[in-house]
Image (tube, helix red, strand yellow):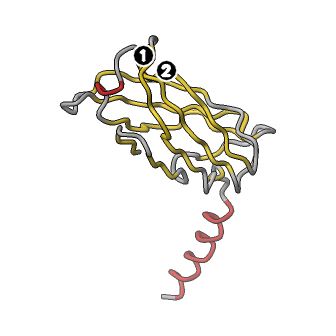
Amino acid sequence: MRAVTCLAIPLAVFLWLTPHPAAAAGLELELNKVEDSPQGCLATILIGNKPGPTLDRFRLDLVLFDGTGVLFDRLLIDLAPLPAGRTTIAGFLLNTGRCDGISRILLRDVPACRAQGGAAHDCLSGLNVTTRAAIGFSK
């Protein structure tokens, strides 16, 4: 039993000291509004970065589903920079069709998330996703 304890303590210390990408805890992502336009369906997103550092890279991998639940499009959207302690408002074209043709949006990944100065962050795990629009939004 003593040998197990002697091995467990150094292992725990090693795992605790091993560098991991920092989690960007507390990021808030809200699909606030969608509206039809001559170009297609426009989305407005609010990104709250209240507790985190300034992010100079923040890219979302979004998947769009139609009314029958079938995937029909995928988007990569760059929303940086995200200043520390602020809420950023971003608008972008979701697709060239009408908004009522989209039933939900899945945030598949945050493939790029980096703090100013170069430190990588795990923005997906600490990200809270909500919607005020008629389109579902989840991760």
**Image quadrant where one finds the C terminus:** top left
Query: Residue 93's mark?
Result: 2
Q: Furthest residue to the right?
A: 117
Q: Secondary structure at mark 2?
A: strand
In this view, the residue in front, 111 or 129, is 129
**Amino acid beneath label 1:** Gly
The reply to whether dot 1 and dot 2 touch (C-beta < 8 Å) is yes
Q: Amino acid at mark 2?
A: Leu
The disc at residue 134 is none
Quarter residue 82 falls in: top right
Q: Residues within 10 Å of mark 1 (few under 14, many from 20)?
A: some
Q: Which residue is mark 1?
A: 40
Q: Residue at x 28, y 25 (%)?
A: 101
Kindly report which numbered mark, 1 or 2, lies closer to the viewer in this rendering.
1
Percent across and percent down for residue 45 are 54, 37
Q: Secondary structure at mark 1?
A: strand
Q: Residues within 10 Å of mark 2 (few under 14, many from 20)?
A: some
Q: Position of residue 22 (x, y in %)?
A: 66, 52
Residue at horizontal 59 percent and vertical 71 percent from the top = 12
